[in-house]
Amino acid sequence: MTKGQAAEGKANGWRIRLINPVLDKEFRLRMRSPRAMWTLFFYLFALGLMSLSAIYLTQELAGRGGSFRPEESRYLFYFLSLAQLGLIAFMAPGLTAGVISGEREKQTLNLLLTTQQSSATIVLSKLVSSLSFMVLIVVSTLPIYSMMFLYGGVSPNQLALVFLYDLFMMFVLGSFGVLFSTLLRRTMVSVIVTYGVTLFMFAGTAILFMVLIGIVEQAYQGQSISYTWVGHVLAWNPAVGMYSIMDPSVNDVVFSVNRWTGGPANGPLIPLWAESMIIYGCLSLLALWIAVRNLRPRHRA
Amino acid sequence: MTIPITGTESEETVQGEVPMIEIRGLARTFGSIQALKGIDLTIGKGTVFGFVGPNGAGKSTTMSILATLLLPSAGYAKVGGYDVTKHPQEVRKLIGYMPDFFGVYDHFKTVEYLHFYGASYGISKKDRDALIPGLLELVNLSDKADAYVDTLSRGMKQRLCLARCLVHDPELLILDEPASGLDPRARIEMREILKELKSMGKTIIISSHILPELAEMVDEIGVIEQGRIAAVGNVADIQSRLRVNRFLHVRLAGREDEAERFLRDRPCVDRVHREDNGLQIGFGGGDDEQADLLHALVEAGYRVISFSEAQTNLEDVFLEITRGGGSA
């Protein structure tokens, strides 16, 4: 065997270990469909349009030829990151909530279930392939982000953390999508339920926080409190989690009651984004475990 | 092959002949509906077993349980000695399952489709490369190797699905209505492939609505009705348990209604029913009685165009069994 053949054999060995048949099939079929190209196009178009509009408005409000203001470009970064998170929240359920129920509806699932592939392999491969496509989309938005860098005001660490958080939320929403896709027979129902959960995560938790903080403020009748448990409700909100990466001062603000002036803050032990990652990390793993357990009929010993 | 005795936790093993399928007291309920009401069935290795019965009788439910896709509510089913609920992974190695309805992936080529399922059964790329051309040849799809599967005709998809069942060389094929929705030519092609598989020594359990086409290739049939096995055995055995031992076909030049009533009153005639081109008679007598019947018809003034013994087929047997509510 030549050196070249040995290297090729080694590469194939890695490929077999890393890419199982289900993942290979998912990659192949997804990228062969024109839908993949159009999804990518519209995502970049939407995000690009939003970013250019934001840049234009910022410049317009500041007056043309205005001086270099990193403070303002920081807000552009905030806007772009939150817009990206919003688009991910919109895409992830759509891409994952039909992965199992879609196979069931196409009558291909039973054929797959009688093969030697384990339930975990099938469920995780479906999730990984959907996430890989979303990673491709997010990575393809880097040139749009780079426009923000022209204006400065953002640290590379912040950017890295924001991207990490984006990837994490994809995993979370993807896991929920896969769970509902496994438990519910119809894709339409699964998509609706997954969007419902996503809406609750983004809007429901914010409303709940506002209601609870209103009650707490009433209870303390103007007294300034530097820590209330109500702030933890916002750890369930991905948008606030993301914002806490970009503006860490929010960690103190959401835990305070009637505290308008300075003074020592007594915020949470860990930042909101970290708390959010712990909560949703556990929930995602639980969702995947339930999905794997319910893919095939189970024998109760 | 070494097979663990299921149902015990020990590492005990048995050598030698184990029935390919062993079903005891198998029951399955869906909510308030009892799809299977405790069926017993044993199918030996290398047997081609025709599973017949009306829609909703429980054929597909039984096959789904054997394919590890459904759990029984009571009883057990073993494939090659492995309990389908306790050792599903072992059972999956032994079976090739073709459901009554199935879909194919869009944007997948025929050869890629087989590679995907081959890889899903853990077959190496090298082995698949050697195996797949032969499979495509077996199912007459060699010229469609690079065609996208969603562009194939229904008959071609059925044959491709059969090739998919065979990709891991299973000992048992579970074929649920493999010829449903096929045109006559495609049915004949499917039948020829099944004959080929039979000659390869595969155990095949096959359900079909096109019973006459099964008759010449099945070794045994099982008739299932309302979740119960109504009769099981080889076609000749079952037939001998019926009152009818041959079917006669008569064509008359007119007066068929009258002749139907006349024939019903003759000795050895069990039943008479009208067909498009004559009368079908379930007859319990021998050659002499058959000759007497023809004589009686002619004597009574009926103008007989033809009077012949019809080829007995599974459909007749099935109709005969189910007509009496499974009393056979």
Image (tube, rainbow, N blue to C red):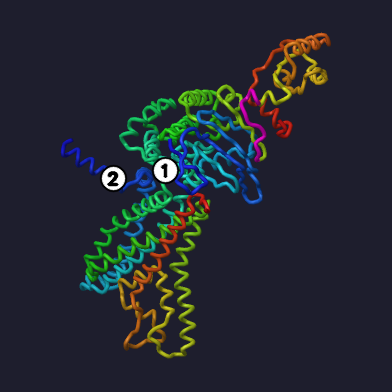
Give, as a three-letter code, the residue at label 2: Arg
Q: Nearer the viewer, residue B251 or A148?
A: B251
Q: Tell me the tag on residue B184.
A: none
- The correct choice, above or below, for B292 with respect to B226 in the image is above
Residue B109 falls in which quadrant of the image? top left
Q: Would residue A52 appear left or right of B278 to someone viewing this image?
A: left
Residue in view at x 52 percent, y 25 percent: B191
Horizontal and vertical percent for residue B41? 59, 36
Horizontal and vertical percent for residue A281? 38, 64
Residue in view at x 33 percent, y 38 percent: B124
Give, as a three-letter code, the residue at label 1: Gln
Q: Would residue B101 appear left or right of B37 to someone viewing this image?
A: left
- The correct choice, above or below, for B183 with respect to A251 in the image is above
The residue that label 2 is drawn on is A15
Q: Which residues are magenta?
A: B227-237
- Mark nearer the N terminus (1 vs 2): 2
Q: Quadrant of the C terminus of chain B?
A: top right
The residue that label 1 is drawn on is A116
Residue A8 shown in magenta: no
Q: Nearer the viewer, residue B36 or A56?
A: B36
Whether residue B138 is visible here, answered yes or no, is: yes
Horizontal and vertical percent for residue B289? 77, 13
Q: Nearer the viewer, mark 1 or mark 2?
A: 1
Q: Chain of mark 2?
A: A
Q: CA distance from mark 1 to mark 2?
A: 19 Å
Contact between labelled residues 2 and 1, with CB atoms less than 8 Å apart: no
- The correct choice, above or below, for A118 with respect to A68 in the image is above
Q: Residues within 10 Å of mark 1 (few under 14, many from 20)?
A: many
Whether residue A107 is visible here, answered yes or no, is: no
